[in-house]
């Protein structure tokens, strides 16, 4: 069984349902462990936080690393350009630039940003503004549900994390058709560079059908899901619903027109695909309708059978759980986005007592038990020639069997105890302190942060030994590999960084390589 380094829960807080995806980060890769949905339906008087708490308890969802997002219609985005690339200068410049473009005081909002383009002398960023009150409201809701999030991301933009598992090449408009709103996100090779939310989606279709046929919205929702809105041999056309879709198409075309400067030409010529996600994306023949109206190929998001990492998504519905999956990926080492509105007084703070009492409790108990056994083994060596030797040997064997149930008692119990103590200390060292007082998780996070976001390098395998980190990766160019070596050499915890086994990847057309980072002895700065 693979050692689980982190359990991450992505929560998509929709108006019609809450979707949850739990991902386990292991040294071998990612495992999508759970995918569940809570349909909210009509308000039955039960507080949402109580329903969320029971939902998490019922499915045994992980609570220690929760990530959610603010809805797109609660956010404001701005595309900005700066004549420099330094990250510290950008962090200072972005809020001041945003302040002059939005009708809010900076004290009432949180501002975060992502790099989305540029060159050696220029940086383009997508800045996002979130009202402090909305962040506080979301945080209060999830705290009361015992699901306090470490990260609050931006809806729409966070979909860029999907490219860690799903192939999203080229230029595409991701259309997230939800219950009350539709979010339009422009994706360039998997990175979202623009987003817009409109208040028109599945509920508007159901309401139109209900008015047209004189029935309830719930019944109209059933008719929509079972028969669609377009005429065929089994059902009649809903003119009211199609009128709503026509409004949606007009908004979509308007958005595409606004994106033409970013695309460098007409959307019809520049876009490879309109990709549909969300519950309403299941509407029968919607893809063909949008393709015919816009002139752009349209398809629902699917997991190709032969795609890499497709196995980890087995059993899930990417149309329904896409946002929750992207949020869960945000908490892994394969995250593509770094936005977080938990800032200043609302920033997440680690509870060291809970960490030590939770993550390392089992290791501490095992180390304590091994210490007791070690004491018994020393006592045995002192009186081995005495008449109590056989009794002590029997007791040690019994303690060994009780501490390690299911393991056969070794012939040389003392040697077995010494090996257990050694293994326990190695595990405690790995989980608790690595190198210069950093945990293994912090170490991998530090390595990930050292890689520039614009560097086209993919880490395919990471291995950690007590003093050596080995990385197997891929890049499209030799220059990127050399740049990676230079950046990793700046990390203070390593004495040597070596790049080896650089080979041409005949299948993908780039370079595969290995990087070995040798840690400094403890105590060295």
Image (cartoon, helix red, strand yellow):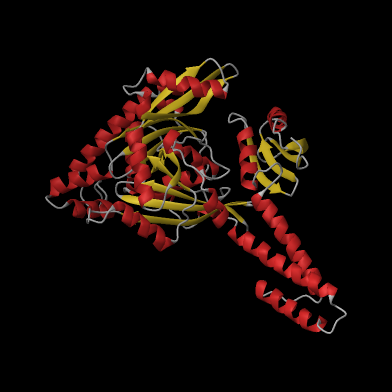
Q: Which residue is more in the foreground, 241 or 426?
A: 426
* Residue 152 coordinates in the image, percent (x, y): 43, 40
Figure quadrant of residue 373? bottom right
Q: Which residue is more in the foreground, 296 or 234?
A: 296
Q: Residue at x 48, y 55 (%)?
A: 62
The total of numbered circles placed on residues is 0
Q: Is residue 486 left or right of residue 235?
A: right
Which quadrant does the N terminus fall into? bottom right
* Residue 185 coordinates in the image, percent (x, y): 41, 34
Q: Is residue 216 left or right of residue 271?
A: left
Q: Is residue 213 left or right of residue 223?
A: left
Figure quadrant of residue 172? top left
Give the farthest residue toward the right. Answer: 385
Q: Is residue 432 left or right of residue 184?
A: right
* Residue 79 coordinates in the image, percent (x, y): 43, 23
Q: Residue at x 67, y 55 (%)?
A: 428
Q: Which residue is more in the foreground, 485 or 254?
A: 485
Which quadrant does the C terminus fall into? top right
- Visible residue check, residue 266: no
- Visible residue check, residue 252: yes
* Residue 391 coordinates in the image, percent (x, y): 77, 83
């Amino acid at each position: 069984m693979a050692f689980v380094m982190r359990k991450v829960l992505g929560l998509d807080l929709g108006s019609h349902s809450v979707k949850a995806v739990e991902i386990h980060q292991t040294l071998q890769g990612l495992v999508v462990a759970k995918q569940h949905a809570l349909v909210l339906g009509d308000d039955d008087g039960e507080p949402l936080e109580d329903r969320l708490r029971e939902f998490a308890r019922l499915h045994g969802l992980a609570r220690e690393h929760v990530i959610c997002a603010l809805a797109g219609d609660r956010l404001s985005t701005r595309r900005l350009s700066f004549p420099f690339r330094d990250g510290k200068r950008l962090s200072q410049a972005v809020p001041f630039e945003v302040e002059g473009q939005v009708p809010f005081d900076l004290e009432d909002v949180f501002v975060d940003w992502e790099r989305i383009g540029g060159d050696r002398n220029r940086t383009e960023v997508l800045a996002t503004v979130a009202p402090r009150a909305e962040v506080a409201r979301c945080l209060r809701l999830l705290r009361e549900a015992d699901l306090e999030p470490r990260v609050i991301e931006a809806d729409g933009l966070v979909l860029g994390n999907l490219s860690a598992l799903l192939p999203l090449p080229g230029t595409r408009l991701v259309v997230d058709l939800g219950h009350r709103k539709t979010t339009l996100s422009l994706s360039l090779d998997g990175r979202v560079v623009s987003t817009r939310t409109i208040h028109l989606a599945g509920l508007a279709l159901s309401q139109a059908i209900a008015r047209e046929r004189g029935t309830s919205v719930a019944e109209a929702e059933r008719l929509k899901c079972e028969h669609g809105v377009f005429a065929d041999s089994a059902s009649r056309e809903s003119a009211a619903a199609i009128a709503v879709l026509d409004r949606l198409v007009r908004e979509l075309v308007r958005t595409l027109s606004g994106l033409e400067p970013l695309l460098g030409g007409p959307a019809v010529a520049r876009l490879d695909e309109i990709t549909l996600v969300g519950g309403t994306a299941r509407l029968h023949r919607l893809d063909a309708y949008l393709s015919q109206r816009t002139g752009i190929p349209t398809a629902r998001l699917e997991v190709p059978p032969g795609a890499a990492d497709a196995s980890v998504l087995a059993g899930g519905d990417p149309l329904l759980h896409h946002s929750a999956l992207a949020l869960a990926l945000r908490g892994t080492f394969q995250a593509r986005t770094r936005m977080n509105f938990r800032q200043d007084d609302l920033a997440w703070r680690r509870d060291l007592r809970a960490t030590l009492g939770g993550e390392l409790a089992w290791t501490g108990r095992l180390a304590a038990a091994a210490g007791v056994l070690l004491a018994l083994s020393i006592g045995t060596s002192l009186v081995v020639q005495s008449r109590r030797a056989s009794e002590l040997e029997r007791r040690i064997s019994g303690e060994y069997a009780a501490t390690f149930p299911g393991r056969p008692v070794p012939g040389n119990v003392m040697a077995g105890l010494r090996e257990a103590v050694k293994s326990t200390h190695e595990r405690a060292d790995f989980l608790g302190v690595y190198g210069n007082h950093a945990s293994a998780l912090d170490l991998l996070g530090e390595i990930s942060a050292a890689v520039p976001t614009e560097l086209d390098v993919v880490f395919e395998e990471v291995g950690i030994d007590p003093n050596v980190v080995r990385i197997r990766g891929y890049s499209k160019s030799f220059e990127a590999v050399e740049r990676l070596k230079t950046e990793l050499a700046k990390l203070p915890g390593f004495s040597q960084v070596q790049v080896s086994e650089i080979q041409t990847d005949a299948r993908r057309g780039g370079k595969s390589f290995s990087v070995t980072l040798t840690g400094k002895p403890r105590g060295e700065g």
